[in-house]
Amino acid sequence: MLRKLLPILGFFVATAGAQAATNPDFVGAAASPPMGPGPGKLFAVDAAPASDRAGAFAKAGTPAGNSFFAAIDAATHTAFIPSPAGRVALVNTGTLRVTGGFATIPGARVARVLPGPRLLAVLSAKEIAFYRLSGHALVFGLPVGGNALAASADGKTVYVGGNMDSSVTAIDLAARSPVASWPVAHSGDLIRAGTHLFSADMRTGVMSVIDLADNSIVRLKTPEVDPRFSYRKIPAATAGFMQLARSPDGATVYAAGFSGNILKFDAAKPAYLGETRVAAGTGPEKLSGLAVAASGNEALVTIENRDESALVSLATGKVLRVFPGVSANRWTAAQ
C-alpha cells in the first residue's frame, strides 16, 4: 500500500512546491500612513484568474508594519519589505510567509531590487543604502534621500527624488557616488523608460521628462491638477499624480491620478496622450497604487478612498474585477 501511495504523495509534494515558488502578478504592502504604525499586511493579486490573498510581514499596529514600496526579486520569489523601524522583512511571494529579515537604515519605506548587479536599494527620506541580495551584506550607503526611486534597465544607475526635494539625483553604483543632478522638484514618483526619466509632480500635475542622452528637460502639463492641493491634506485632494508604471515594451508610461483617471504618455517622444477614466462605482475614485500586468493589457489600481483595488483594461478603463479591502499605496509587478 505504501509503495502505491508514494507516487501520489510525490505528486502532492511537487504541487505544493510549485505553488510555493509561483510569483503572483502584483504584490503590495497594505496602505500605511507616512509615519507611525502600519497594518503589517502584504497583498498578492493575480490577473488571470483574478484573485487575491494576504499574509502578514510584521506585527500590526507597529512601525515594523508600516511600508510604502515593497521590492520583488522574481528570481528567488522574494519580497523585500522595508519599514521605518529600520528592518527589511523577507516574504516568499508564493506562500506569503516570512522567511527572514535584516536590519537596515531607520525610516526606510521604499525598496527596489536591481537584478543586474543583484543588489537591493533601500531608501529613506535622508539616505539610501545598497545590500547584496544574497546574504544581505551592506555594500555602501549615501546621504541621498527621498521617497521616489527608479533604476536603469541594467540596474547600474539609480535615480532618487522626493516630494520635498528640489532636484533628482543619479547614483552610479560602480562609482558609489552621485554622478548627475537635474533641477526637477517634487518627484512624487520616478520611472525610467528608454533614455527618458519621468518625474511626476503631484502638486502641479506636471510630468517632467529628463532626456538622459542630452540632459534636456521637457515639462508636460496635464489636467491632473487640484488648485487647492496641500501635501498636509493629500487625502482631501481631488487630483494629483500618484504611482507611475511602464508598459512591458517600455513604449508607454502610465500615471495613477487622484482624479480617478489613468494618464498615458508616449515614452519616446515624449508626449502626453490623454487619460482613461476608471469607474468602479459611484462617486469619487482616488487612484494611488498602479502596476501593469506582464501582458501589457491590464493594470491593477488602488482606489484609496474606497479601501479597494481594481483590475482594469488599460485600453478602455473597464473594470474587470474589484478586490474589496485590498489597498496598497504602491504596487509592484512581480513577474
Image: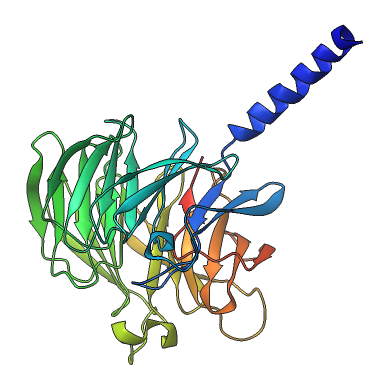
186 vs 72, nearest the viewer? 72
Looking at this view, name the residue that lies furthest to the bottom.
228
40 vs 123, nearest the viewer? 40
Q: Picture quarter containing residue 190?
A: bottom left
Residue 302 visible in rendering: yes
Looking at this view, name the residue that lies furthest to the right.
1
Q: How is the image coloured?
A: rainbow
Q: Is residue 277 above or below residue 30?
A: below
Q: Is residue 306 above or below residue 326?
A: below
Left or right placement of residue 215 versus residue 23 in this view: left
The count of marks equals 0
Q: Picture quarter containing residue 271?
A: bottom left
- Percent coordinates x, y for residue 59 in the rendering: 48, 59
- Percent coordinates x, y for residue 317 in the rendering: 60, 66
- Report the residue at 12% width, 53% height from top: 215
Quadrant of image for the N terminus:
top right
Residue 238 visible in rendering: no
Looking at this view, name the residue that lies furthest to the top.
3
- Percent coordinates x, y for residue 129 in the rendering: 20, 47
- Report the residue at 81% width, 13% height from top: 7
Left or right placement of residue 260 versus residue 310 in this view: left
274 vs 72, nearest the viewer? 72
78 vs 276, nearest the viewer? 78
- Report the residue at 32% width, 76% height from top: 205
- Percent coordinates x, y for residue 86 in the rendering: 29, 55
Q: Is residue 332 above or below residue 76?
A: below
Left or right placement of residue 16 versus residue 76 in this view: right
